[in-house]
Image: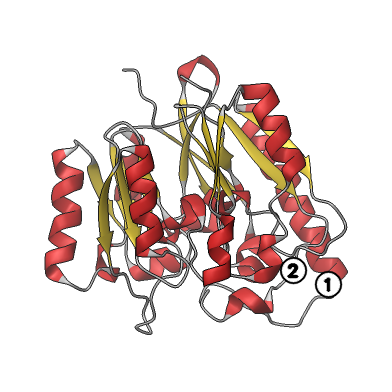
Amino acid sequence: MHTTQITDTILMVRPANFGYNVETAGNNAFQTNDNSLSGKEINARAQAEFDAFVAKLRSVGVNVIVVEDSEVPLKHDAVFPNNWFSTHEDGSLITYPMYAPMRRLERREDVVAQLTKDFGFDKHIRLEKRELSERFLEGTGSMILDRDNKIVYACRSIRTDEGLLDEFVLWMGYEKVLFESYDMNGLPIYHTNVMMALGTNFCVICLDTITDAVQRREVTDKLTQTGKDIVSISREQMNAFAGNMLQVKGAQEQTYLVMSSQAYQSLTKEQRQQLELHTQLLHSSLDTIESYGGGSARCMMAEIFRKG
């Protein structure tokens, strides 16, 4: 079956100064800072995790474009490029407005220029000026895209502005499914991609976070109507980053659902079996990146979709 949902090419940014970002910690409940390691140790561990992860992806035939993070300006979260740009089969490359001032420095014109040259993107939609009016939409962190059915799923937060989502929907010809999603402490979940991951014919989702019954039904109905097998995870599993996964294509059209080892270990045997009906599971240890960065495997992979 031909699908535009997944790609065999991803871009990843090797961190130069990975670390705990105070600017994002206010609304990213997944970050922790235990002060047990020095900044240099944290960065060295993150780089080692990054390198092992890239090697694992390449070993199954995923094309990984590795971009080296620049030493200056300082960017603690550069390892999460999926928040500042996305690419689309219609030839669009979109750059996004980011909540944290330090994260805005991650947008790189040299990377955009190289991708445009190599993959032929002919439309650059720039949303970053929305930062001036304190409106944010953080790429495929904010938006879970069903590219085949042209549906965008998103949970509302300070990093996911409904008006900007409406603009995206208008430009890209998508349908919007917007909902509220809360963590165990009743705080809005900062990015949709920590509670939901969409594959070609399945969806991993923490439905418990959608406390409004009407919204929850709307989400499940839409997933069911579009033929997605729903794999429901608990809030505890979500906190282990089991919602932060990405399905990719490897060699010989094999598909892989990529996640961290922590996420994999949190899944029950039944959940793994349910997922393995659809795809192979691939995991790598990302403990340092998850702990200090509050993001996981999916956040580290920016998908490259060639112009169709």
* Residue 286 seen in this snapshot: yes
- Gap between marks 1 and 2 measured at Cα: 7 Å
- Placement of 282 over or under 154, stated as above or below: above
Closer-to-camera residue (113/147):
113
Q: Farthest top residue?
A: 252
Q: Quadrant of the N terminus?
A: top left
Of marks 1 and 2, which one's residue comes earlier in the chain? 2
- Placement of 47 over or under 236, stated as above or below: above
How was this image coloured?
secondary structure
Q: Which residue is mark 2?
A: 19
Q: Which mark is residue 39?
A: 1
Q: Given contact means CB atoms under 8 Å apart, are the residues at marks 1 and 2 in contact?
A: yes
Q: Is residue 157 left or right of residue 284?
A: left
Percent position of residue 121, x then y = 58, 27
For the point 48% across and 64% down, which residue is it?
240
Which residue type does callout 1 highlight?
Answer: Gly
Q: Secondary structure at mark 1?
A: helix
